[in-house]
Amino acid sequence: MKTPEECFKIANEYFENAKEILNEIEVKNDRYSNIKKVQKACGLMWLAVLSAIDGYLMKRGVKYENLPKTTDAYWGILKKYLVHNGKIIDAFDTVWDVIHSYGYYNGGNDARIIKIGVKEAKFIIEKLSIKDKNKGGDND
């Protein structure tokens, strides 16, 4: 069983590893040249975001065994726990569309699009980590 702190640590490690992978890929005409590496980086980035959300939820009292297991379950629980934070919910939507669906699942290689997803993933991880430290401020 993971602790919230372990979840945040994993989120940051996965995020940094994903960025390193993306930075190593040659970009020509705003396209990554190695789709397999893009998919690997996007898979790690998606897991980083989910791990940050798990840590946040555990800090809010959700037991490890009750954490979401599907994307739909994450949507539902995000809306429940972050009802006043449209920015994080919108960012999650973008990360799902860009990082998970476009980059990982479909093998999209447009670096401009992937960078949007990376920015939103970073936003989620940082905001939820800050909320964890501040224990409040769900109205951002």
Image (spheres, helix red, strand yellow):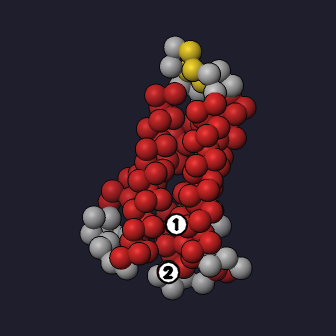
Where in the figure is residue 102, as x and y percent of width and height? 57, 36
Q: What's the residue at 59%, 65% (across, down)?
A: 9
Instruction: Give the numbered dot on residue 131.
Output: none
Instruction: Decide if residue 107 is in sight here.
Output: no
At label 2, the amino acid type is Lys
First along the sequence among labels 2 and 1: 1
Circle 1: element type: helix
Question: Quick check: 87 above or below 118?
Answer: below
Mark 2 is surrounded, within 10 Å at the Cα level, by few (under 14), some (14 to 19) or many (20 or more) other residues, namely some
Q: What's the residue at 68%, 28% (across, down)?
A: 35
Question: Quick check: 106 above or below 78?
Answer: above
Instruction: Give the numbered dot on residue 53.
Output: 1
Q: Nearer the viewer, residue 22 or 113?
A: 22
Question: Quick check: 62 above or below 117?
Answer: below
37 lies left or right of 119: right
At label 1, the amino acid type is Ile
Look at mark 2 in the image and give the residue it sits on. 59
Quadrant occupied by the N terminus: bottom right
Q: Quadrant of residue 7?
A: bottom right
11 lies left or right of 88: right
